[in-house]
Amino acid sequence: MRIGLLTEGGYPYVSGDARLWCDRLVRGLGQHEFDVHALSLGRQQEEEGWVPLPPQVSRVRTAPLWTAEDDGVVYGRRARRRFTECYGELVAALGTDAAPAPEPDGADDSAAPCSHLADRFGSALYGLAELARDEGGLVAALRSDTAVRTLERACRAPGAPRTAREARVPDLLTVAAHLERALRPLSLDWYGDDGLGAADLCHATAGGPAALPGLLALHFSDVPLLVTEYGVRLRSHYLGLGPDASGPDAAAPAVRALLAAFHGRLAAETYRRAAVITPGNAHARRWQERCGADRAKIRTVYSGMDAEPFAEVGEAPDRADPDTLVWVGRVEPAKDLVSLLHAFTEIRKERPKARLRIVGASAGPEGEAYLGHCRALAAQLFPDEAEGVHAVGDNPVSFEEIGGPEAPTPADAYASGAVVVLSSVVEGFPISLVEAMFCGRATVSTDAGAVVEVIGGTGLVVPPRNPRALAEACGALLLDPERRERLGAAARARALELFTVEQNIAAFHGIYLEIVSHCPVHRVVLGETGEPLPFATPPEAHVPGHWTDPTTPGWAATTPVSTPTLAATEGAR
């Protein structure tokens, strides 16, 4: 089948966030044809180029989200009226709900969007898309004074929440600029019969702007939409716009309220129209359900990882130092290495020979500062120790990077320790934890993100920001080598069953076939008289095999069906 793969800041760019799993998916499904439609997030990303593409990628079309030139489209009076009506409906749907972020684990259903507002938002969104298609673009209109005045009227309208009514002119300009960037996919020329309209299926690899082209392909050409979220975009927007976030946008309550409402409405519309939604873990699934996703549409598909680099360590006998703990990852405040260092002080009281290896590079300027703080704290908590008066001491805590002499590869880093530790307070899908499981290592982790779901009883889990609990769990495993061995073997078996590339590819292959088998064929085959031929492209045509000849089957040609009811029924299947 022909897949329209929709990405935002990911594949096929070298520095893309979702580059690895998308590349593995495309290469693993060589029997299908992929058209990649990519939204870039910055000039540097575009300049770094693409990854090598396999032959099943027939075409790549790109567009920037970080910049957009004025399209030069000048609306006439009727088009201006259409824009004002549609944009007014869109922003009016935002001004009716300024609720904070939904709590996915809570029991309150107040965050679920009402159907009236969802219909209002969806109708306005597709009205703007149709206007962009008819007139040639929306960029100039979304940047116009008309857009700002329309937004201001919605915020001042009766019934608007207090935070929206308090929006000042700078706040309105900020919101209008953000909406213009988020709605840029509406102005792209991707939706004709030579683009996404010719696809059998659109697969959005993230929510938000990446899913917008899929929504329009569904609206204009009835192309079914699959949405995959390994990290919920709506949650990222809430965190980025929260009161503790940095930047001028985060300081204005009106800006936070309106943009949170917009991204919430867009997520709800995406989940409502998608044929299937595939979260990467139960934590993402709960967010999607709280935003209105139908449980019947949801299929959890875990991120696929390459187990081969860790096979040798996982299959070899455990030769690690029985007194060594290992932490592997990106050094940043969310990883809470401070709690880990304080926990290690407790461990050293019971096991004076214990050592802690922190293996990983810092993530950006904030990570550099945090790494420096952790080094200083380690030097303060653990002065260099020497066995005698004339010996040179060393610190029981070491800071290293992958590629150094002590840890040339990630597998070597995991292999060096008897227990692998994860101390995060914020975590999505814990990749380092899965890698440790591939290596057959016993683990101690904090309960953050999808950690409990990944571990599944094959490791110890403690509350975050609790150094004493972390120390007790690590100490218990250091004292019990048989327990470490049992947990490590169980962890490796679980990882090989659930988190491999092969599992991920097989899951999406089945979902592709499931979606297409339940959707009508939108490419109509015409007969010699110019009339549509019912059953000319049966569902089996999407499955490789000897029956894929596009010509009309004999039984269909010799038994023409002229009953409108029967033809309509087949088209609705």
Image (tube, rainbow, N blue to C red):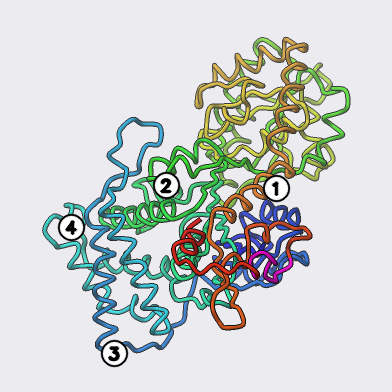
Which secondary structure, mark 1? helix
- For badge 2, the amino acid type reads Leu
Dot 4 or dot 1: first in sequence order is: 4
**Cβ atoms under marks 4 and 1 closer than 8 Å:** no
Residue at x 84%, y 40% (from the top left corner): 405
- For badge 4, the amino acid type reads Glu
**Cβ atoms under marks 1 and 2 closer than 8 Å:** no
**Cβ atoms under marks 4 and 2 closer than 8 Å:** no
Residue reaching furthest front?
Answer: 559
Circle 4 is placed at which residue position?
Answer: 166
Examine the rendered structure and indicate whether residue 527 appears above or below residue 356.
Answer: below
Q: Position of residue 10 (x, y in %)?
A: 61, 60
Circle 2 is placed at which residue position?
Answer: 239
Q: Which mark is residue 505?
A: 1
**Is 553 one of the magenta-colored residues?**
yes
Q: Which residues are magenta?
A: 549-557
Residue at x 53%, y 27% (from the top left corner): 447
Q: Position of residue 386 (x, y in %)?
A: 78, 20
- For badge 3, the amino acid type reads Gly
Q: Position of residue 564 (x, y in %)?
A: 45, 67
Dot 4 or dot 2: first in sequence order is: 4
Circle 3 is placed at which residue position?
Answer: 76
Q: CA distance from mark 3 to mark 2?
A: 40 Å
- For badge 1, the amino acid type reads Ile
Dot 3 or dot 1: first in sequence order is: 3
Which secondary structure, mark 3? loop
Q: CA distance from mark 4 to mark 2?
A: 22 Å
Q: CA distance from mark 1 to mark 2?
A: 31 Å
Q: Quadrant of residue 29?
A: bottom right
